[in-house]
Image: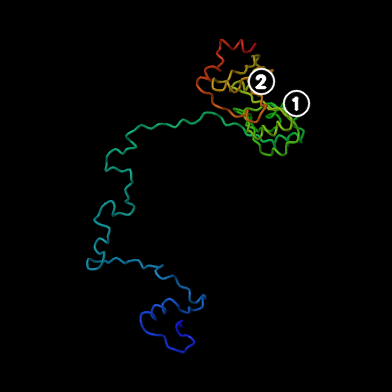
Amino acid sequence: MVSALSGSWGRTPATGLMSRRLYHHVVVREPFNLGNLKPNKGAKKRIKRLARSRRGFGGRKCGVGNKGQKAKSGGSIPLWFEGGNTPLFKLFPKVARMKSLKAPLNRVSLKTIQLYIDKGRLDPTEQITLRILWRSGVLSMAPKRGVYLVPEGAEHLRQAIDIQVQESSERAADAILKRGGKLQLVYYARIPLRAHLKPFKWTKKGRPVPRNARPKPRYQDFYCEQNEKGEWCRNIKDPDDVLYRKPKIGQLANSVVWPSDFASVKD
């Protein structure tokens, strides 16, 4: 190491406290290369070796203590252990989390609909219903609950369409309405949905096809119209109309169609 105190005057470094401070702070370091690589001072610490007898440090028990559960390998005690008492989580009964029994909606994008129109498997001049979506191959399996229209590929939609689904996003509804199309949200119960998709299951046995049921009370304010087939629906005229807003208690009681009033509503 070369001290930085040796200046151009040719004097030797002065002795004393000031010279020692400058010597330790201003030094010319060695060039950095692969031969002088080493860890920083204090980065590596040697593990303290425990003694093997009572004379050295940590002998006899080696800092572990007497023979007990904590002295054994893997003898850790869980946090919930209460010394043999019934733990807190066993004092109360289990509350089962009810899994939703609703089948998920099948997601269909506008890009897929335009692709099947280009292939000639969908006719944009006719109303595209749930059964047509299934028969044309847009849906690989018969839907259990309905279809949810997603806006993926909305920029690829080039023509007006008239489509019936169960739910739709705002962007998908906006894309359809901007191109002069029509969007109708239809309510289907479980059995009427099967009758809509597979009416032959009833007709081949000579049975009447089940009619669509009224929506549940919490949905009657949303599906408040009926189409020419007698299905409860909601005609979308604005993209915000697709949003379902849960009615308040007073509003729900006033908007429910009771069985005695159903005939008058149908007329």
User: Quick check: 43 above or below 13?
Assistant: above
Q: Mark 1 — residue?
A: 126
Q: Nearer the viewer, residue 222 or 27?
A: 27
Residue at image position (66%, 38%) is 152
User: Quick check: 74 above or below 81?
Assistant: below
User: Quick check: 12 above or below 90?
Assistant: below
Marker disc for residue 143: none
Where residue 264 sits in the image (x, y, percent)?
A: 61, 10
Where residue 61 sits in the image (x, y, percent)?
A: 25, 60
Q: Mark 2 — residue?
A: 199
User: Neighbour class for label 2 at 10 Å: few (<14), some, many (≥20)?
Assistant: some
Question: From where the camera sits, is residue 15 visible?
Answer: yes
Q: Left of 30 or right of it: where is 56? A: left
**CA gap, disc 1 to disc 2?**
20 Å
In the rendered image, the residue lying farthest to the left is 54
In the rendered image, the residue lying farthest to the front is 9
Residue type, label 1: Glu
Where residue 87 sits in the image (x, y, percent)?
A: 31, 39
Q: Left of 69 or right of it: where is 142? A: right
